[in-house]
Amino acid sequence: MRRRAVSWVRGAGYSVVPECRQKTVVYGVVSRSGMEGVEERRPIKKTESKANCTASDRPPRQRERQGKSPRRRREVKRSQRRLDDQEQLLWGGEPRRLPGQHELSEPTGSTVETSDSSPKRWDRCRRPHFLHGPYPTTHFGPKACILPNPTSIMHIQDPASQRLTWNKPPVNVLVIRKIRDESLLEPFKELCRFLVEEKKLMVFVEKKVADDVTLTNDEAFSSICKKLCTFREGFDDISHCIDLIICLGGDGTLLYASSLFQGSVPPVMAFHLGSLGFLTPFKFESYRTEVAKVFEGNAAIILRSRLKVKVVKDAPERSGQSGGPEENGLEPHSHGSSEAGKVTQQLQVLNEVVVDRGPSSYLSNVDLYLDGRLITSVQGDGVIVSTPTGSTAYAAAAGASMIHPNVPAIMVTPICPHSLSFRPIVVPAGVELMIMLSPDARNTAWVSFDGRKRQEIKHGDSIKITTSCYPVPSICCHDLVYDWFDSLAQCLHWNVRKKQTRLSEASDSSDTEN
């Protein structure tokens, strides 16, 4: 009887390499791998055992092994024991371990033969990707990572066990302050003085923040200001040298911090000094204690998934120029014939991608594809594709449900659809959405990413959206569940209602008699 097992848990004694289609013959076990994450293993029948096989039936490498020394034969036996342990672990038993063996590995003495062709039934079972989305990276910046959890399932850790730890003590800290807000100058100076003088850290700030006239004219802060490292957005790459991000302001500062890191994002600690503060759980009054706790490690952390967005446009006709980067950071894309002669732009989005009708008075008419198949056409003011973090932003105002950030999903919410039956939907995080103008659309559309980089979408352009493997590790004040519900209650006044009064005993008795 054939049995199948899916290797979701790391350390199960063996691993299946995706896109690997080969047949592996080993002593006592036949394993076939032709599906992503799925491996079929069955014991060899007695008629297939080594004792009943003739010399001609044995694989070439096995025939060569017959004349080896006793030491070599002992190594083969050890390899066979490892395979037995793997098979026992696969079906739920306790594995046997050899002295000094730390983990089960692929046997070195097994006989492997590869075949270029595989049975057609494996092709029908293969799937291009998993619906639960990509496995997010657990290293954030040069020195931060999540504390490993041996009981993780499906490559996604239990949210309650997501704890921040440091491989090395943090050295470089990026401080982002809300600009055009004079009330944040004193908290900003106090935090920088604490980090530079007491913690002996290297502090990075934006150049326009360091060049503030109020800071430069402050003689008491001049010594600290000279020690600050400055950078300019779009010119200086600081993604590989920042260990921790501290935000002073509202939710916009966290969105801006996410846009600075298009790859791995360092841990983010956000203080509530803005207007709404849904994503900023910390209070600045206790910043010394809170920052010290983060530096010690073992802090609760929530992974806010981001969207990987790819905008494909027709290359503009340019006379007298060939090649080179385009305007707005667009670079020619040469991968694949379907996108030949086009330019692409790739972005990491934390909240949402908004496609709307722009300044036109006509309703927008865009087609929505899911994994290459046309799902529906959106006719209205536009459509919002958001993360669970963005479900409490523009999507909530458009009537979508609010989703906890740890739920792997993508939300699709129409904006004022000209239909009575178009409701917001939630799709798995691993799918790829594509938005294009409908062939019969009367006008173009406009797209924005977290409210920035707004641009026009014309016929032939496409927007491809899927879940990114680079989340934003947001440090929690208490824990990832309490912080979210506390933000719902404090910022959005979720389910706030005057309490119903209790009926009196006299009223109860009269109602019973009647």
Image (cartoon, rainbow, N blue to C red):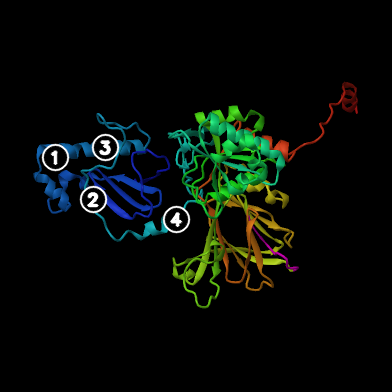
238 shown above or below 490: below
Q: Is residue 359 magenta?
A: yes
The numbered mark, 1 or 3, whose residue comes first in the sequence reads 1
- Label 1 is placed on what type of residue? Arg
- Label 2 is placed on what type of residue? Val
The numbered mark, 1 or 2, whose residue comes first in the sequence reads 1
Q: Secondary structure at mark 1?
A: helix
Give, as a single range, the part of the protein colored magenta.
Answer: 353-361
* Viewer-side residue, 216 vs 333: 216
Task: Identify the mark at residue 112; answer none if there is no mark.
Answer: 2
Residue wearing tag 1: 72
Asked whether disc 3 touches disc 2, contact meaning CB atoms under 8 Å apart, the reply is no
How crowded pointer 2 is (Cα within 10 Å; few <14, some 14-19, many 20+) is rated as: some
312 shown above or below 501: below
Asked whether disc 1 touches disc 2, contact meaning CB atoms under 8 Å apart, the reply is no
Work out whether residue 412 can be spotted: yes
